Amino acid sequence: MSEIKGQLLGMLIVLGIFTAIGGTLVTAFQKEAQQITSSLEAPTVSAKAVIAAPSGNIYSVD
């Protein structure tokens, strides 16, 4: 009976270690994913238009 208890205790310890490592890795990956997402966001484009009139004049419209 003590062998079974020892094996169960060992399995629980290993499970706890994997859970702790997994939690740390998930947190690290989420943090990195947010940084990558923020660096990949498209820059804002201004709503400025340049119009060429038939007379040859160029106008800038905001």
Image (tube, rainbow, N blue to C red):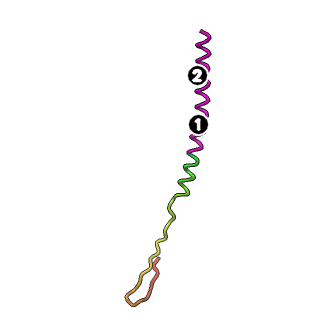
Q: Is residue 33 above or below residue 16?
A: below
The prevailing secondary structure element of the residues shown in magenta is helix
Quarter of the image where the N terminus is located: top right
User: Whole-percent x and y of residue 46?
Assistant: 49, 70
In the picture, residue 29 is in which quadrant?
top right
Q: What mark, if any, has residue 23 been given in the picture? A: 1
Indicate yes or no whether the magenta region holds residue 42: no
**Residue range (magenta):** 1-29
- For the image, the number of numbered tags is 2
Indicate yes or no whether the magenta region holds residue 27: yes
User: Whole-percent x and y of residue 39?
Assistant: 55, 57
Kind of residue indicated by mark 1: Gly
Secondary structure under tag 1 reads: helix
Kind of residue indicated by mark 2: Met
In the picture, residue 38 is in which quadrant?
bottom right
Q: Is residue 34 above or below residue 6?
A: below
